[in-house]
Image: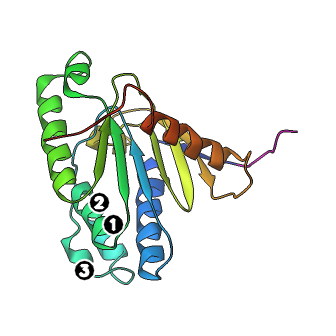
Amino acid sequence: MSIEQRSTHVDEKNWFIVMFDLILQECLKAIDGKETFLYLISPYLYNFRLPTSWPSFTSNAIYPVSDVENFKDLIKMARRHGIPVTIQCYPRDTLLTHQKSWIVNYHEEFLEELYHAGCKITLNPDDHGKLIACSQGALNSSANVSGSGADPEKQGNIGDYFPYDDRKDSSYQKKLGWAKEWFDDNKTTAYQP
């Protein structure tokens, strides 16, 4: 018997909000000493500025939020709170067949910074999926983790948010299982700067 789990539609107008909220809520959970994790799967990712209103919006929740100006700062904040961050993306050679060289260079620079911040980074030439998942939910979408992916004016991204559900056959658990299969795939290799 299939378990039906409701999802929330996510489009280009609210993708960034859902992604930001997932990471912020995971930080709050870590502050409370609860078990946390963060998975980011995207063929490519690069740093981008957060809207100027976001750090002030969260200033009452997490300190020091004044240091959070871009996505890299957000991930570093997660790492400072002890959240294990696992990332999977394309290796450089694969990405060069899909993207302009400047995007590939930004991607590589960003990966190196995240690696030095303590993120576990894996590479797989076949994983074109896009998923942001944590202990509280999973956001499956067509958006890469990038400035254009977060900008509603640039792309028509669409996806679904699945809240935490402990039932084995829930959509949330299936998303986590899918991610773990890619992390363990025989073509997956560890990133080395």
Whether the residues at callouts 1 and 2 have beta carbons within 8 Å, the answer is: yes
Kindly give the residue lying farthest to the top in the view shown: 97
- The residue that label 3 is drawn on is 64
- Residue 148 drawn in magenta: no
Q: Is residue 122 left or right of residue 132?
A: left
Q: Does residue 36 appear anywhere in the picture?
A: yes
Asked if the residue at tag 2 contacts the one at tag 3, i.e. Cβ–Cβ closer than 8 Å, the answer is no
Instruction: In the rendered view, tell whether residue 191 sits above or below residue 14.
Output: above
Under circle 2, the secondary element is: helix
Residue at the right extreme, as displayed: 1
Q: Residue at x 47, y 42 (%)?
A: 131
Residue underneath mark 2: 75
Q: Position of residue 92 (x, y in %)?
A: 19, 27
Name the magenta segment's main secondary structure.
loop
116 relative to 43 in the view: left or right = left
Bounds of the magenta segment:
1-6
Q: Amino acid at mark 1?
A: Ala
